[in-house]
Image (cartoon, rainbow, N blue to C red):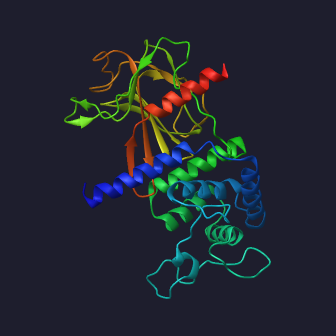
């Protein structure tokens, strides 16, 4: 195994470990985080859910959160201190004290949130202003979209403790699935299967497995009628080969686990309207983003976990 492969494997393992720990949000941790977000919001006029969304995003891309910290945000040193020069975006630095000690500490949660709030406020407080400020800080479209989506989810549910999950099909339906991730696929050239196929009858309801925002809806020649949902853990959930969409579901909608988004079908492998080239089933895929790259990973263990959770809740 070469160095590049080893590094990629390490990234994948780290990300998967983070995914299995997403349920471990204690009430005390949530309360402390919310207190910080709302305190900063009160003095900056930036809604609290944007601070929460920024923190949530960085919670997924930073491997370790120091024990003494509550948030996971790690500001760029150039953002914090600034470097003199006309070509630099942060010439003066934004680091400032957000508490009574009057010291700008790049490892202090209050100072970090206060400094980020002042930076965003320099652009304005509308949604578009905040989007522009985030782009100029991260300089990555997917990052900005993820943070804005997460903010919408937190705004709707008024909490950061959103750990519920749901199996994508009703348990009473006649369905079956095996671990098919990585299998070879022929249509469209040589490629691997980036998901799990859950076979069921045409028209069986398909549900969102997670809290998130509908990011994509429409036709794909491989996936047929499909929906993509970006969740609050930087994960894109892909539902393909649908028979159709639930009336009213649109791009930008905030969804929760259990919300019906469409139904099982056999569409795809051709131009819009192509159907019946394979048995009806739901193709369910998961793609992780670490702030630099996005990749597919095996959803099978999560489906088994959520299926078990659903059965235990009945």
Q: Is residue 84 left or right of residue 3?
A: right
How many numbered marks are there? Answer: 0
Please state the horizontal and vertical placement of residue 239, each as a whole percent of the image: 44, 30
At 57% from the left edge and 82% from the top edge, which residue is drawn?
81
In the image, what residue occupies the spot 46% across and 33% down?
301
Residue drawn at (56%, 53%) of the image: 147
Q: Is residue 248 left or right of residue 104?
A: left
User: In which quadrant is the C terminus drawn?
Assistant: top right
Q: Is residue 234 visible?
A: no
In the rendered image, residue 182, in percent from the top left (x then y), is placed at: 31, 35
Please, is residue 172 above or below residue 160 in the view? above
Q: Quadrant of the N terminus?
A: bottom left
Q: Is residue 224 left or right of residue 307?
A: left
Query: Within the image, what quadrant is residue 190 found in?
Result: top left
Q: Nearer the viewer, residue 300 or 138?
A: 300
Classify residue 216 by image quadrant: top left
């Amino acid at each position: 195994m070469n160095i590049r492969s080893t590094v990629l494997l390490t990234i994948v393992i780290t990300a998967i470990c983070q995914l299995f720990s997403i349920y471990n949000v204690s009430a005390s941790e949530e309360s402390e985080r919310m207190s910080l977000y709302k305190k900063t919001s009160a003095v900056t006029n930036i809604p609290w859910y944007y601070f929460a969304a920024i923190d949530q995003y960085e919670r997924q891309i930073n491997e370790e959160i120091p024990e003494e910290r509550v948030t996971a945000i790690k500001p760029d040193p150039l953002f914090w201190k600034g470097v003199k020069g006309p070509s630099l975006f942060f010439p003066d630095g934004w680091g400032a004290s957000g508490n009574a000690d009057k010291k700008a500490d790049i490892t202090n949660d209050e100072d970090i949130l206060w400094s980020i709030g002042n930076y965003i406020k320099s652009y304005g407080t509308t949604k578009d202003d905040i989007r522009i400020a985030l782009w100029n800080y991260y300089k990555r479209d997917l990052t900005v979209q993820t943070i804005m989506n997460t903010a919408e989810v937190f705004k709707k549910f008024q909490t950061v403790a959103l750990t519920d999950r749901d199996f994508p099909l009703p348990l009473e339906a006649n369905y079956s699935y095996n671990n098919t991730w990585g299998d070879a696929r022929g249509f469209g050239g040589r490629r691997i299967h980036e998901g799990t196929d859950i076979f069921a009858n045409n028209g069986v309801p398909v549900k969102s497995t997670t809290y998130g925002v509908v990011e994509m809806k429409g036709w794909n020649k491989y996936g047929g009628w499909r929906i993509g949902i970006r969740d609050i853990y930087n994960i894109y959930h892909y539902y393909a080969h649908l028979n159709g969409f639930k009336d009213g579901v649109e791009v930008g909608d905030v969804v929760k686990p259990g919300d019906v988004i469409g139904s099982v079908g056999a569409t795809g492998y051709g131009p819009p309207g192509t159907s019946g080239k394979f048995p009806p089933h739901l193709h369910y895929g998961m793609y992780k983003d670490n702030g630099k790259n996005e990749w597919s990973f095996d959803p099978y263990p999560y489906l088994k976990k959520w299926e078990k959770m659903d059965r235990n809740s009945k």
